[in-house]
Image: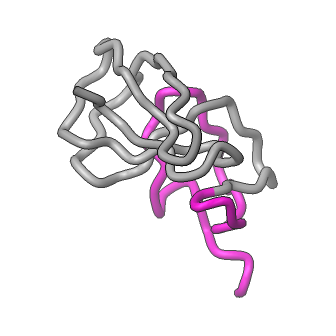
Amino acid sequence: MRDFLIHNSQDNVGVVARDVKPGETLAGETIDKRDGFRLTARQDIPLGHKIALKDFKVGDTVIKYGEDIGKVVAPIRAGEHVHIHNLKTKRW
């Protein structure tokens, strides 16, 4: 069983397939290439939410589905929850 999925091998976030708790070692997989990936969760992340696959600094771009989905507005470490508190659209 995979704990998170990465939609495109270019993505720098994955989507958790269950609620996760800090300290859990998670197994993930890219959907397009079936590459395996391991990551330790640093925060509670609810089912269906994004998990950072790498460290981000303010201004970095988040990629999901192989597409730019926004910019980082607060530092994010690999394994942390990526959501509206640290990611904003570039449209506005």
In-front residue for pair 9/45: 9
Magenta segment: does it hold 68? Answer: yes
What is the quadrant of the N terminus in the image? top left
Image vertical order of residue 75 relative to residue 8, above or below: above
Q: What residue is drawn where x is 76% and y is 56%? A: 61
Q: Position of residue 78 (x, y in %)?
A: 57, 27
In-front residue for pair 30/92: 30
In-front residue for pair 43/6: 6
Q: Position of residue 67 (x, y in %)?
A: 69, 66
Spot the residue most to the left. Answer: 19
Q: Main secondary structure of the magenta part?
A: loop
Q: Position of residue 11 (x, y in %)?
A: 64, 48
- Residue 3: which quarter of the image? top left
Specify start and end residues of the magenta stretch as a single range.
64-92
- Residue 51: which quarter of the image? top left
Number of numbered discs overlaid on the protein picture: 0
Magenta segment: does it hold 72? Answer: yes
Q: What residue is drawn where x is 35% and y is 29%? A: 43
Spot the residue most to the right. Answer: 59
Q: Position of residue 36 (x, y in %)?
A: 49, 22
Q: What residue is drawn where x is 58% and y is 32%? A: 53
Q: What residue is drawn where x is 45% and y is 32%? A: 29
In-front residue for pair 23/37: 37
What is the quadrant of the C terminus in the image? bottom right
In the image, taking residue 54 as reference, residue 20 lies left or right, namely left
Spot the residue most to the front. Answer: 33
Image vertical order of residue 69 relative to residue 25, above or below: below
What's the image's color scheme?
A: one colour
